[in-house]
Amino acid sequence: MSILNEITWLLPELAENQQKIAKYILDKPESVLMLSSSRFAEDIGVSQSAIVKFSQKIGMKGFPALKIAISEELGRNERLKSYPHKALHNAISAEDSLSVMAQKLANEKTAAIIETTRRLNFAVFQKVIDIIDNALRVQIVGIWASGLTAKDLSYKLQKIGIISLVEADLHVQLATAHCLTAKDVQIVISFSGKRKDMRTAASMAKAQGATVIAITGSKENPLAKIADYVLESVSDENEWRSSSISSRTAQNTLTDLIFLALMQQRKEIAKPQVLNTSMAINNLDD
């Protein structure tokens, strides 16, 4: 993950002084490169040791290493702006060989899986699993790439005996949300969390008393503020992405983990149901 994205993700969890440092870096990354740690500390009104501790908190050995990381990222971004025709997806260039492209893609998708699981609050996640396990019905909402993740999760839940509702058409999603009750759960999948249609569906479900769970990119986006529970799907996709590749990988990491956790929790009934379904499908080939 890029250093500026890492700082953005960590921002809500930082102490007051650390937030001051983070916000300055995010607002003026070029200016930070020109400052010593002592001058930086003086400019924003914190101690020099706070600068060093902040650098270490985000995985750097110290402030000089942080400046190098920022400089490298700004350089990459500038190259993308100068040569947009060469960008295929994030850091993958049109000039990359197939082997280089494959390695970059593997690195990007692996990073999405690692960062998503690293940021997971397992106490919150277990609560989410309990709520889904005891739900009367589970509506899963998503469109475009997130809609594919929604459909995949719905199929998985059905395999283990959980009634799930999924539909690609937005009007049907809203109609279904309007019919939910306090016994139901709605899972909304949206990487940006900014789409009005996803927020409308979540607000409608919440108005009916349903529990709303958001699988989204940040705890601070508009969708997350509506949801009762938030699971962050972390990926390093920017404006140069050609498709939802690493963001979908991050979402699938969470939905697969939801499925496995429910399989474990419902092991007495889930495993036989999965086996029976598989046997029924296999019998179709006879």
Image (cartoon, grey):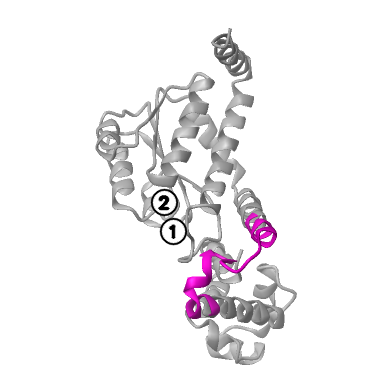
User: Which residues fall within the magenta stretch?
Assistant: 79-105
What's the mark number on residue 21? none
- Distance from the alpha carbon under mark 1 to that under mark 2: 6 Å
In this view, 42 is above or below 208: below
Q: Is residue 254 visible?
A: yes
Does residue 254 show up magenta in the picture? no
Q: Amino acid at mark 2?
A: Ala
Q: Position of residue 122 (x, y in %)?
A: 61, 43
Quadrant location of the N terminus?
bottom right
Q: For this rendering, which residue is in front, 105 or 38?
A: 105
Quadrant location of the C terminus?
top right
In this view, 226 is above or below 140: below
What's the mark number on residue 220? 1
Residue at 49% over, 33% down: 153
Judged from the image, the secondary structure of the residue bearing numbered disc 2 is helix
Residue at 43% over, 22% down: 163
Q: Is residue 49 visible?
A: no
Q: Position of residue 64 (x, y in %)?
A: 70, 83
Instruction: Using a 10 Å C-alpha cutoff, classify the residue at mark 1 as few (fewer than 14 neighbours), some (14 to 19) or many (20 or more).
Output: some
- Pointer 2 residue: 224
In this view, 170 is above or below 66: above
Labelled pair 1, 2 in contact (Cβ < 8 Å): yes
Does residue 85 show up magenta in the picture? yes
Q: Quadrant of residue 166?
A: top left
Q: Is residue 87 left or right of residue 174?
A: right
Q: Quadrant of residue 92?
A: bottom right
Q: Is residue 169 left or right of residue 285?
A: left
Q: Amino acid at mark 1?
A: Glu
Q: Position of residue 255 (x, y in %)?
A: 54, 38
